[in-house]
Amino acid sequence: MKTFLDAAEAWICDGYSLDFRYIATHGGDGYEIWDASLSLNPLPSQKDLNFRIDVAGFAIGQIQRVETNKGLLLQLLKDAIGGKVGLIEAPMTLPLSELFDCYSEMSHRDRWFSDLHLLINGDNRPAPTTTELAVIDSALRLAEPPFDGLSDVANWLGLKAPGSTSTPPKIEIRIGPPVDLIFDGCSVAGDTLKLTLHAHPALDTSLVKLSFRAVPGNALAARQHATNNLVWGDVRDRRREGTAHIKLENADSVLVMLMLGNSTVRRQWFVDPEKARNYRLLATQHFDRDLKMLRHAVLDSHDSVKFEQGIASLLFLLGFNPAIQIETDAPDLIVTTPGGRLAIVECTTRVADFASKIGKLVDRRGALSKSLEASAHRFNILSVLVCRLPRDQIATHADELRVRNTILITGEDIAAAFDRVRLSNDPDSMLTDLVDRMNSSSAWIRNLSA
């Protein structure tokens, strides 16, 4: 908790905007939260999305405020962490047990964009009856603005509707950084790195730190700090622009690391398009420029077959040797590495079949191991479950995955993989890192204090 609050103190500036979304029910002297999200960002929303609906015992809405005082925002954060939000006439509360239960993506060491994140879980309570849900659905169709029931308004707000999931009531907090790289103004070409940053006008830019690693580069000289190369301009259009031009040596690509105080904001690869080193990528891009179709299949398409094909293609770009299986009683993919390691992969785009997918993986891994042993081949076969959903939407615990010896790949991992495809990767090392993460990770963090 202290890490989150300390970083929030450094990041939030006067003039930040807030966006609070909620689904709650009337209870006592106020409202009891089912699901809520609180976002603080340096720029206001481009559209006015404020609305409030009070019908059939439910309070549902979205509150946007711009150019808010820093002190008020910090107090709002502390209250929300304690399960209370006071943005309307009566307080909204999240019933909390004595054992404080929270989760933070800030513990994930492999994130590329590192906003501040904290999810506070409340106590489980009985879901509304089907009759109660039918009443609220009808009431929402007559509301202003009208929604086609709880599921529709929950999807609009990006929240979970009561009765749609077994996860407990929660408040999820995200804080956007007051400085970031602007990709359109960043490039690597001809051994020169050009960077463009935009910062909130109230940010103390002395807190911004830049460093980079050039590949292949020239030994330790390829790793340098670049903060002193930044030149900050005047404030225009509610932002201050910083630029840097840095001479490199023998650079095909550059990993840029942006820090704000002691907190990571972003890690980002920039590649010289004339020096792409991954020949698999060059071959694939000849037919799918900018990987547009691959990104759609893996990140957006609802077609499970295309998702499996896309994951196979992405693994190919990363240096693996994947094979799609035609037989129905088989894993979706069988994957080998240059070092001779073997893995079976199941792919899913949803949570509903999550448990069955894990069960199938374990059974098929066991059957394949026995078959290979009978042929005098001994392999430590890895089982991998690839799910497109973000990690915090997958209701499974790290302990369960460890017991079943199954590696979980989530939406964040898939998105990060696209940042690596231009490089020459080592699939065996990547698998080792995933196994280490499986053995050491903890999905739910209680009493977060570091």
Image (cartoon, helix red, strand yellow):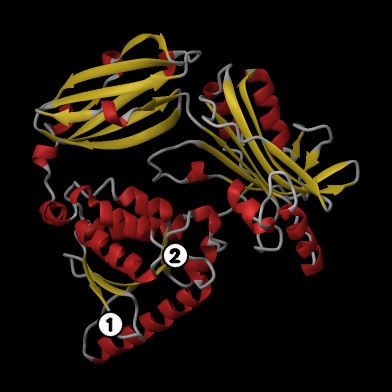
Mark number displayed over residue 349: 2
Residue 54 in the image: x percent, y percent? 80, 45
Residue under the point 20% across and 18% down: 245
340 or 317, which is in the foreground?
317
Which residue is most to the top? 234
- The picture quadrant where one finds residue 78 is top right
Secondary element type, mark 2: loop
255 or 235, which is in the foreground?
235
**292 in relation to 78, above or below:** below
Secondary element type, mark 1: loop
Residue under the point 84% across and 35% down: 90
Kind of residue at badge 2: Thr
**331 in relation to 59, above or below:** below
Relative side of 277 to 35, left or right: left
Alpha carbon separation for disc pair 1 and 2: 19 Å
From the image, tell me which residue sits under label 1: 326
70 or 235, which is in the foreground?
235
Mark 1 touches mark 2? (CB < 8 Å): no
Mark 2 crowd level (few <14, some 14–19, many ≥20, 10 Å Cα): many
**52 in relation to 365, above or below:** above
Sequence order check: which comes first, mark 1 or mark 2?
1
- The picture quadrant where one finds residue 437 is bottom left
